[in-house]
Image: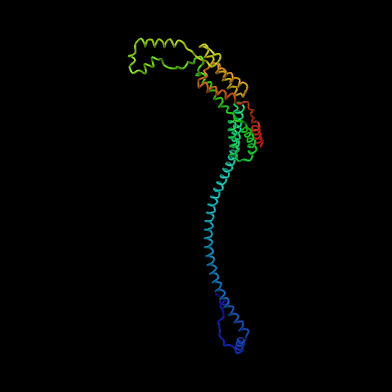
């Protein structure tokens, strides 16, 4: 190293008096003291601020740690919430799918119910139309007023069971026809036909007047004596018994009979069969006239049948008297009753069906 670079040696010289006076003057300066005090206060303030700042940093660090921990917990909770939300969304999706399926099923059920209600109305209307048609057939073909009334009552009950307001007008029309039928005189056509059938069946067993026998007035004297005697039949004399039997045979050869009519109708044995068959034909014609409500033919056939029975059959027989009584009652019955038709009810049903088809 060069010597020029070395610093000069230090030397201590005692302060001079002017310099000492200047220093003491400086310490006596109040502004210097104030500056020193301010500087001290500033230093203390700085130190205190540093301490507070350190405390604040620690508190901030602690709070940041707490915030970080809370953030982690929040993230954990958020993740759990997301998982729960995902689960809930899955359940909600399944529930929405079930709701959609339920709505679809509800719509299907509503359509089925509407179809069923429509079909039920159509079935009810078909049953009502069938009942009214049956009533009309009973009136037109058989003249069975009671059967027609029952059929219309069944149709009215079917309408009464259905509380739909559109059936009210149809029910009013049925009730009007029912009132007209109930106002008719009661005529038991099936009962009258059955009575005629019983009379026809009894023709084969009615006794003819020519075949009737006189009633026995008593027993032969010898037979009575034999029955009243105390001895046995062998005790009678043999010739007396032979004579009694011979006399009985002689008496049986001759028959005396009294007829209540002026001219007894005599028939050959082969003609009795044709008489009964012709009488049955008369009664069958009367039965057909009854079903056709032909009053003149009905009474005319019954009149001829009564005349034949009076002429050719035994009037003393009880079964014949019963038959004649039945024929008289049938002939006195008025069968020519004007029956109403059910066109109004049938037209109302057809109009109701046409109205539903248009809708």
- Location of residue 354 by image quarter: top right
- Location of residue 12 by image quarter: bottom right
Please state the horizontal and vertical placement of residue 107, each as a whole percent of the image: 59, 42
Image check: 67 left or right of 227? right
Foreground of the two, 179 or 21: 179
> Relative to 21, is 44 above or below?
above
Image check: 316 left or right of 294? left
How many badges with numbers are in the image?
0
Please state the horizontal and vertical placement of residue 228, each as a whole percent of the image: 36, 18
Foreground of the two, 105 or 266: 266
Q: Is residue 153 visible?
A: yes
Q: Is residue 134 visible?
A: no
- Location of residue 146 by image quarter: top right
Quadrant (top left, top right, bottom left, bottom right) of the N terminus: bottom right
Residue drawn where x is 55% and y is 70% of the image: 56
> Relative to 158, is 2 above or below?
below
Question: How is the model colour-coded?
Answer: rainbow
Foreground of the two, 332 or 178: 332
Please state the horizontal and vertical placement of residue 43, each as a whole percent of the image: 58, 78
Please state the horizontal and vertical placement of residue 273, each as a whole percent of the image: 52, 14
Residue drawn where x is 61% and y is 83% of the image: 34
Quadrant (top left, top right, bottom left, bottom right) of the C terminus: top right
């Amino acid at each position: 190293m060069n010597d020029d670079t070395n610093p000069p040696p230090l030397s201590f010289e005692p302060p001079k008096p002017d310099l000492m006076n200047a220093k003491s003057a400086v310490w006596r300066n109040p502004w210097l003291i104030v500056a020193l005090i301010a500087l001290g206060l500033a230093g203390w303030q700085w130190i205190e601020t540093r301490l507070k700042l350190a405390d604040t940093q620690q508190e901030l660090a602690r709070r940041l740690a707490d915030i970080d921990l809370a953030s982690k917990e929040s993230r954990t909770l958020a993740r759990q919430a997301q998982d729960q939300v995902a689960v809930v969304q899955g359940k909600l999706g399944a529930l929405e799918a079930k709701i959609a399926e339920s709505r679809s099923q509800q719509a299907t059920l509503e359509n089925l119910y509407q179809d069923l209600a429509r079909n039920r109305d159509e079935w009810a209307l078909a049953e009502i139309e069938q009942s009214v048609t049956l009533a009309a057939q009973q009136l037109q073909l058989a003249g069975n007023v009671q059967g027609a009334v029952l059929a219309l009552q069944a149709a009215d009950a079917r309408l009464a069971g259905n509380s739909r307001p559109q059936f009210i007008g149809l029910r009013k029309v049925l009730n009007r026809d029912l009132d007209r039928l109930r106002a008719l005189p009661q005529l038991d056509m099936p009962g009258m036909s059955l009575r005629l059938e019983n009379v026809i069946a009894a023709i084969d067993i009615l006794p003819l007047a020519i075949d009737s026998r006189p009633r026995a007035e008593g027993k032969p004297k010898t037979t009575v004596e034999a029955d009243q005697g105390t001895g046995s039949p062998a005790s009678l004399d043999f010739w007396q018994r032979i004579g009694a039997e011979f006399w009985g045979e002689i008496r049986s050869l001759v028959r005396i009979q009294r007829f209540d009519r002026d001219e007894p109708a005599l028939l050959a044995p082969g003609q009795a069969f044709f008489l009964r068959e012709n009488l049955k034909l008369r009664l069958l014609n009367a039965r057909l006239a009854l079903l056709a409500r032909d009053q003149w033919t009905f009474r005319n056939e019954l009149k001829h049948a009564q005349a034949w029975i009076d002429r050719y059959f035994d009037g003393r027989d009880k079964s014949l008297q019963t038959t004649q009584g039945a024929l008289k009652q049938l002939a006195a019955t008025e069968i020519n009753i004007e029956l109403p038709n059910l066109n109004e009810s049938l037209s109302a049903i057809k109009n109701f069906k046409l109205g539903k088809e248009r809708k």
